[in-house]
Image (cartoon, rainbow, N blue to C red):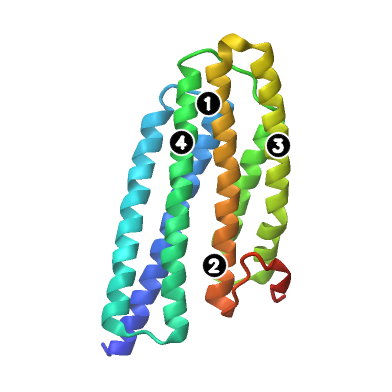
Amino acid sequence: MTQLRHFELELADLKRSIVAMGDMVDRALGLAIEGVQKPTADLRERARTLEDGVDAMETVIEDRCHTIIALQNPMVRDLRFIISAMSIASDLEQIGDHAESISKRAHYIACHSPVANPAELGELGRLAQTMLRQSMDAFVTGNAEVTRKVIDEEPQTDQLTKACYAFIQDRMAEEAPRIKEYTHLLRAVSALEQVGDLAMAIAEETVFMHQAQMIRHHHETLKQ
């Protein structure tokens, strides 16, 4: 096997690892979203197991990227991919952290008093997970239209979050004995909003990787 062929296989394996990490994070997020809508006491351990797997994958991916850079002296395009892979792995790890945090909040609520969910909570969860999936699709395909969808959807997560906050704050005022439970729900909503932000960050990174274009804070420059 030539050195070039070996390098190409390393990059392909790195890409597969990022996709596998994204799939694991997606499962963790789906579990968390389901849990916060219908809190269950056994959610926390399942979420922790997935989060441990996500953390381990990020460490492996980061080490692999450092090794490739140190030993292979990659050219500009490949170096861009490797840098993006490290950034995306970090973003995915943070989404995994948020998923575990949501699961913890759901666990607390399940073990205490049930509380009413905002009507917008389900849509916020669905949108956050959709954005994650779209951003990973953009990573694989480089499709600028998919990237644009993620960017255009981010303001909607802000609107849904504000609506959830308003509902929860009203409930806090009306149901003082359950203020701790509503505080946990408020933090779960905040975590979902952060997932949307991180999904957009992944989408932005894919543009840098595929098009050599930095669009963070400059979305109007995204090439079609």
Q: Amino acid at mark 1?
A: His
- The residue that label 3 is drawn on is 162
- The residue that label 1 is drawn on is 184
Q: Which element is circle 3 on? A: helix
Q: Position of residue 173 (x, y in %)?
A: 67, 15
Q: Position of residue 57 (x, y in %)?
A: 34, 55
Do the residues bearing badges 1 and 2 touch, measured as CB atoms within 8 Å? no
Q: Which element is circle 4 on? A: helix
In this orientation, does residue 96 appear? yes
In the figure, is residue 218 to the left or right of 38?
right
- The residue that label 4 is drawn on is 101
Q: Amino acid at mark 4?
A: Ser
Mark on residue 61? none
**For marks 2 and 4 on the same chain, the one whose residue lies earlier in the sequence:** 4
Q: CA distance from mark 4 to mark 3?
A: 19 Å
Q: CA distance from mark 4 to mark 1?
A: 10 Å
Where the N terminus falls, by quadrant?
bottom left
At x 53%, y 18%, the residue is 180
Mark 1 Cα-neighbour bin, 10 Å: few <14, some 14–19, many ≥20:
many
- The residue that label 2 is drawn on is 205
At x 53%, y 68%, the residue is 140
Q: CA distance from mark 2 to mark 4?
A: 25 Å
Q: CA distance from mark 3 to mark 2?
A: 27 Å
In the figure, is residue 183 to the left or right of 147?
left
Do the residues bearing badges 2 and 4 touch, measured as CB atoms within 8 Å? no
Q: Amino acid at mark 2?
A: Glu
Q: CA distance from mark 1 to mark 2?
A: 31 Å
Q: CA distance from mark 3 to mark 1?
A: 16 Å
**For marks 1 and 2 on the same chain, the one whose residue lies earlier in the sequence:** 1
Displayed quadrant of residue 51:
top left
Q: Position of residue 99 (x, y in %)?
A: 48, 40
**For marks 4 and 1 on the same chain, the one whose residue lies earlier in the sequence:** 4
